[in-house]
Image (spheres, rainbow, N blue to C red):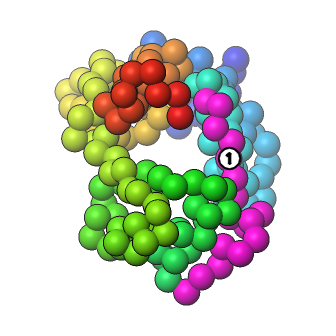
Amino acid sequence: MRTSRPGLRLAYGRSPYTEEALQVIEPPLSAGHRWLADLNTDLVTQIALTLGSRASLLLTSGMSSTAAEGKTERLERICAAVGEHELWAGSGTRQYLDTAALAEHKITVTWNEFTSRHPRYAQAWPKQGFEPGLSVIDAACAIGWAGVSAMLRAGLLAYRPPGETR
């Protein structure tokens, strides 16, 4: 597949799975989205499908009653709207996320500490070093979508006991 993304091809041309990665991201990139949010939604959806995710992407703009004054209250309302009682949060939110307020609404927080334990994989430009958590595209170009899926599943097991299917 020839792509109109010379920048991606130049950056990842040495990577063994570049064509495979571009086959997934090229259609959303070429779809002519007017808004960045629409492009992002399309990319996330296509990548999730490729990785075999069974999760559904829900936009808060399509939910009722999620508007709120504060960030924590908004998160409470979003969780309530989808019937969720667990919030996975990036470690950077530790500084401001009010876990006590969430706990009052029976919402537990699981901190995603993925960056500190990010698996390493071969890089096309090894002299530049490895940058953990760079992007799913970087990983897909280096190890393929099957490799990314396996890497994510292995990381998920660090949070979920074997046999838990959530």
Q: Amino acid at mark 1?
A: Leu
Q: Residue at image x 47%, y 28%?
A: 164
Note whether residue 56 is visible. Answer: yes
Query: Residue 144's spot in the image, x, y percent?
Result: 49, 17
As for residue 61 lying within the magenta part, the answer is: yes
Magenta stretch, residue numbers: 53-69
Q: Quadrant of residue 66?
A: bottom right
Query: Residue 68's spot in the image, x, y percent?
Result: 59, 82
The image shows residue 115, relative to residue 81, as above or below, that is above
Instruction: Determine the secondary structure under disc 1.
Output: loop
Q: Looking at the picture, tell me which residue is in the foreground, 95 or 81.
A: 81
Q: On the rendered image, what quadrant is the N terminus found in?
A: top right
The image shows residue 12, relative to residue 132, as above or below, that is above
Note whether residue 128 is visible. Answer: no
Label 1 environment density (alpha carbons within 10 Å; few <14, some 14–19, many ≥20): few
Query: Residue 37's spot in the image, x, y percent?
Result: 67, 58
Q: Residue at image x 79%, y 43%?
A: 31
